[in-house]
Amino acid sequence: MAAVLKLNPYLGTARKMATLAKVAHIKARKEKLESKRTKLSPEEAAKVKAAGKAWHRTMISDSDYTEFENFSKWLGVTQ
Protein backbone atom coordinates (compact mmCIF):
# COMPACT_ATOMS: atom_id res chain seq x y z
CA MET A 1 0.00 0.00 0.00
CA ALA A 2 2.90 2.33 0.76
CA ALA A 3 4.21 2.03 -2.79
CA VAL A 4 0.80 2.87 -4.23
CA LEU A 5 0.53 5.91 -1.94
CA LYS A 6 3.98 7.07 -3.10
CA LEU A 7 2.84 6.90 -6.71
CA ASN A 8 -0.60 8.41 -6.03
CA PRO A 9 -0.73 10.39 -2.76
CA TYR A 10 -4.35 11.42 -3.35
CA LEU A 11 -5.47 7.78 -3.06
CA GLY A 12 -5.22 7.89 0.74
CA THR A 13 -7.27 11.08 0.90
CA ALA A 14 -9.84 9.71 -1.54
CA ARG A 15 -10.23 6.54 0.53
CA LYS A 16 -10.70 8.54 3.74
CA MET A 17 -13.27 10.77 2.06
CA ALA A 18 -15.15 7.76 0.70
CA THR A 19 -15.20 6.14 4.13
CA LEU A 20 -16.43 9.33 5.79
CA ALA A 21 -19.11 9.79 3.13
CA LYS A 22 -20.28 6.22 3.62
CA VAL A 23 -20.49 6.66 7.40
CA ALA A 24 -22.42 9.93 6.96
CA HIS A 25 -24.80 8.26 4.50
CA ILE A 26 -25.47 5.36 6.87
CA LYS A 27 -26.09 7.76 9.76
CA ALA A 28 -28.45 9.93 7.69
CA ARG A 29 -30.37 6.88 6.46
CA LYS A 30 -30.72 5.55 10.00
CA GLU A 31 -32.03 8.91 11.24
CA LYS A 32 -34.47 9.13 8.33
CA LEU A 33 -35.85 5.66 9.02
CA GLU A 34 -36.16 6.36 12.75
CA SER A 35 -38.10 9.55 12.04
CA LYS A 36 -40.54 7.64 9.81
CA ARG A 37 -41.23 4.99 12.44
CA THR A 38 -44.13 6.12 14.55
CA LYS A 39 -44.36 5.40 18.20
CA LEU A 40 -47.99 4.80 19.17
CA SER A 41 -49.35 5.66 22.56
CA PRO A 42 -51.24 2.87 24.36
CA GLU A 43 -54.57 4.56 23.52
CA GLU A 44 -53.74 4.75 19.82
CA ALA A 45 -52.51 1.16 19.83
CA ALA A 46 -55.79 0.05 21.42
CA LYS A 47 -57.75 1.91 18.72
CA VAL A 48 -55.74 0.24 15.97
CA LYS A 49 -56.24 -3.18 17.54
CA ALA A 50 -60.00 -2.59 17.94
CA ALA A 51 -60.27 -1.51 14.30
CA GLY A 52 -58.43 -4.67 13.23
CA LYS A 53 -60.74 -6.87 15.27
CA ALA A 54 -63.81 -5.11 13.84
CA TRP A 55 -62.48 -5.61 10.32
CA HIS A 56 -61.88 -9.28 11.02
CA ARG A 57 -65.44 -9.71 12.33
CA THR A 58 -66.88 -8.12 9.18
CA MET A 59 -64.73 -10.39 6.99
CA ILE A 60 -66.05 -13.44 8.84
CA SER A 61 -69.67 -12.31 8.52
CA ASP A 62 -69.23 -11.33 4.86
CA SER A 63 -67.79 -14.74 4.01
CA ASP A 64 -70.84 -16.63 5.29
CA TYR A 65 -72.35 -17.79 1.99
CA THR A 66 -74.82 -20.31 3.43
CA GLU A 67 -77.65 -17.78 3.46
CA PHE A 68 -77.42 -17.15 -0.30
CA GLU A 69 -79.17 -19.52 -2.69
CA ASN A 70 -76.75 -18.78 -5.52
CA PHE A 71 -73.90 -20.42 -3.64
CA SER A 72 -75.68 -23.64 -2.64
CA LYS A 73 -74.20 -25.59 -5.56
CA TRP A 74 -70.78 -24.12 -4.86
CA LEU A 75 -70.97 -25.09 -1.20
CA GLY A 76 -72.35 -28.55 -1.98
CA VAL A 77 -75.49 -27.90 0.05
CA THR A 78 -78.71 -29.39 -1.24
CA GLN A 79 -82.06 -28.00 -0.25
Image (cartoon, helix red, strand yellow):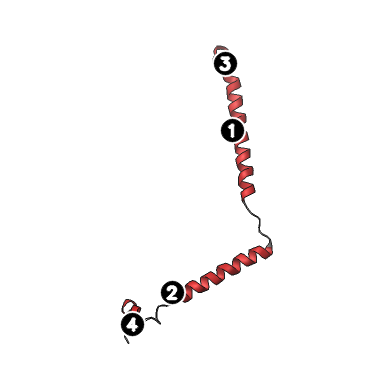
Question: In the rendered image, which residue does mark 2 sit on?
Answer: 63
Q: Nearer the viewer, residue 20 or 65?
A: 65
Disc 2 crowd rating (10 Å Cα; few below 14, some 14-19, many 20+) is few
Residues under numbered marks 1 and 4 in contact, where contact means CB atoms less than 8 Å apart: no
Residues under numbered marks 4 and 3 in contact, where contact means CB atoms less than 8 Å apart: no
Disc 4 crowd rating (10 Å Cα; few below 14, some 14-19, many 20+) is few
Q: Which mark is residue 77?
A: 4
Disc 3 crowd rating (10 Å Cα; few below 14, some 14-19, many 20+) is few
Residues under numbered marks 2 and 4 in contact, where contact means CB atoms less than 8 Å apart: no
Whole-angstrom CA distance, mark 3 to mark 1, is 22 Å
Residues under numbered marks 2 and 1 in contact, where contact means CB atoms less than 8 Å apart: no
From the image, state whether disc 2 or disc 1 is nearer to you: 2
Q: Nearer the viewer, residue 18 or 63?
A: 63
Quick one: SS at disc 3?
helix
Whole-angstrom CA distance, mark 4 to mark 3, is 83 Å
Residue 47 in the image, given as x and y percentages of width and height: 63, 67
Quick one: SS at disc 4?
loop
Question: In the rendered image, which residue does mark 3 sit on?
Answer: 5
From the image, state whether disc 3 or disc 1 is nearer to you: 1
From the image, state whether disc 3 or disc 2 is nearer to you: 2
Residues under numbered marks 3 and 1 in contact, where contact means CB atoms less than 8 Å apart: no
Whole-angstrom CA distance, mark 2 to mark 4, is 16 Å
Q: Which mark is residue 22?
A: 1
Q: Quadrant of residue 10?
A: top right
Q: Residue at x 59, y 33 (%)?
A: 22
Q: Quadrant of residue 18?
A: top right
Q: Residue at x 61, y 21 (%)?
A: 13
